[in-house]
Amino acid sequence: MIRTAAKVLVALSFIFVLFSLSGETVQAANLYFSPSSGSYSVGQTISVGVYVSSADQTMNAASGVISFPSDKLEVTSLSNASSIFSLWVLEPSFSNSIGSLNFEGIVLNPGFVGAAGKIITINFKTKAAGNPILNFFSGSVLANDGKGTNILSNLSTAQFSLSSSAITPPTPSVTPPAGISGTPTAPIINSSTHPNPDKWYSNSTPEFSWEVPSDVTAVRLLIGKIPIATPTVLYSPAISEKKLDKMEDGEYYFHVRFRNQYGWGAITHRKILIDTQPPEPFSIEFPEGKKTDNPQPPILFKTTDSMSGIDHYKVKINNGDFVVTTEKVLSDPYLPPLLESGKQTVVVQAYDKAGNYVTASNELTILPIKTPKVTEYPKKLKEGEIIIIKGESDLEVTVTVWLKKEGEEPFAQNIVSDKEGNFEFVSEKTPKRGIYKFWLTATDSRGAKSEPSEEYVIVVGEGWLSRIIIFFTKYLSPITLLLFIIFGLLCLFWYGWYRFNTFKKKIKKETKEAETTLNRVFALLKEEIRGQIKGLKKTEPKEKEKVTKKLEEDLDIAEKFINKEIKDIEKETKK
């Protein structure tokens, strides 16, 4: 009976020990690739990162053997930059003939805990079309527990699509595996000041925010220059936003991690790019000199930006608009649009990738080419004759003859000078009667222009008026001509004033004469009528008839005198 009881006690003890051992929690870790998929063309390079995830327990060592199809992929290099390993038990090595790669490293105390611990980066060259697969032939992740417990629970794979046609590869991104044992997923970080993690900003006080799930009880944050790091600054209860103090220029990483009842979850590593300084000062150079007759002279400008780099330049000439151009170097000058002759002010702004800019300016002078010279032209023509103009200019340039009739718009006709610089213009239109002016300009094959020549006058039609116009327009300056016009107007005014005074005097004289004559005639008539009236009282009827006839004759004579004086006055008013 005692023996039976002892056996039962031993059995119960053994079962208790088993249950006690099975109750120990062994945390899980993963070895994985990032990116784990993508489409590429043959001949391109694929950079694949090898990562370890140990979100719940600190690890201090890992190893692995990776296999790959050597007929489709070829390892060109390995990189341990930014690796969490500080010691290598077995330096990473590879064999393209076998299609394998080995690594074994150690993380010094306190070890590593996190979702994306970078081990190495493998650079593959794609050799042939197909769907190559990367996998771990073997691997291990050892816990930092003093026992070297292997906590590896999963070995991931990666598969790529290789095509013979050109395909733009996706931007690689580190995608850690899903949370372990119910821990929170990696936070999604937003930023109102730095929304794009791959873009440079001139704001040195970034702000970030994130949604805090209802089961999250705490959050850890960290800011630094290590891409993959474990945040250590604890906030409990959890906060949902953070504004960082003014930071120096550079590349930073903001790390955020949540904790719930199951433990700490995956970490989000958010890149921050800050550049507050403008590019280096620079100067503008003109290889052909600051004075040139080239209407499109090359312009050189170049600068650097030590932080974000030069993004683009803006160029403005005189009062024109800024033109955006790409980065230029001394061997690839900027060519402006065709410039007019005269002084030109060139302004260049150099922008970095954060939007900071520095300005430079310089001046150059565009010289005109030789102005065409007229050697022969007709000063006057009969209506219907052709205008022929001969002259000299630079060799093989386009000479433009501008012909303008008074009161009309000018029209242009082009001719090309010969190898000796001579040209002959024959008008395409037959000129009509009138006064014509013409002048010349020249344009060479580069687009360079000359100054306009002096103006010449051609009179179509004959007469003394045309000769006077030729004399005045050819030999008298505009000021002299204006003085002649003013003098002529003064003479005309004086002559009008003189004629008016003479006319006034004659009218006055004729009026006086008419007045005197009328007074004399009416006095005689009055006296004659009175005498005749007295005689009528004593005379016979026959005599009365004679007197009446005499009075009528006297009235006729008076009427003639009056009409004569009126006609004299009318003659004077008509002159």
Image (cartoon, grey):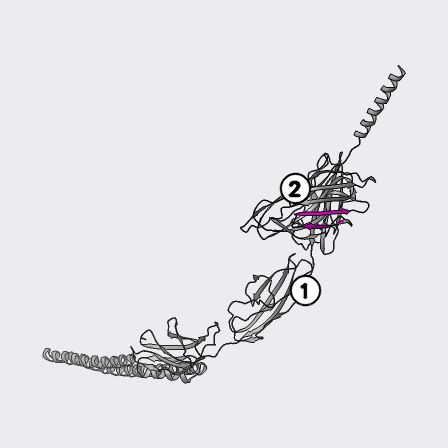
Q: Position of residue 268 (x, y in %)?
A: 70, 44
Crowd band around label 1 with a 10 angstrom C-alpha radius: few (<14), some (14–19), many (20+):
some
Question: What is the quadrant of residue 387 in the picture?
Answer: bottom left
Against 144, residue 409 (above or below) is below
Q: Residue furthest right?
A: 2
Secondary structure beneath disc 1?
loop
Q: Nearer the viewer, residue 45 or 509?
A: 45
Q: Position of residue 280 (x, y in %)?
A: 68, 64
Q: Which residues are magenta?
A: 90-107
Question: What is the quadrant of residue 187 in the picture?
Answer: top right
Looking at the image, residue 67 sits to the left or right of residue 148; the answer is left
Name the residue beneath numbered marker 1: 280
Classify the position of the N terminus by image quarter: top right
Mark 1–mark 2 Cα distance, whole angstroms, equals: 47 Å
Looking at the image, residue 172 sits to the left or right of residue 110; the answer is left
Q: What amino acid is labelled 1 in the image?
A: Glu
Q: Position of residue 57 (x, y in %)?
A: 78, 39
Against 75, residue 491 (above or below) is below
Q: Residue furthest left?
A: 542
Which numbered disc covers residue 157?
2
Question: What is the quadrant of residue 509 in the picture?
Answer: bottom left
Quick one: label 1 or label 2, which is nearer the N terminus? Answer: 2
Which numbered disc covers residue 187?
none
User: Residue at point 58% right, 64% down?
Assistant: 315
Looking at the image, residue 142 sits to the left or right of residue 540; the answer is right
Tell whether position 449 is magenta.
no
Q: Main secondary structure of the magenta part?
A: strand
Tell whether position 103 is magenta.
yes
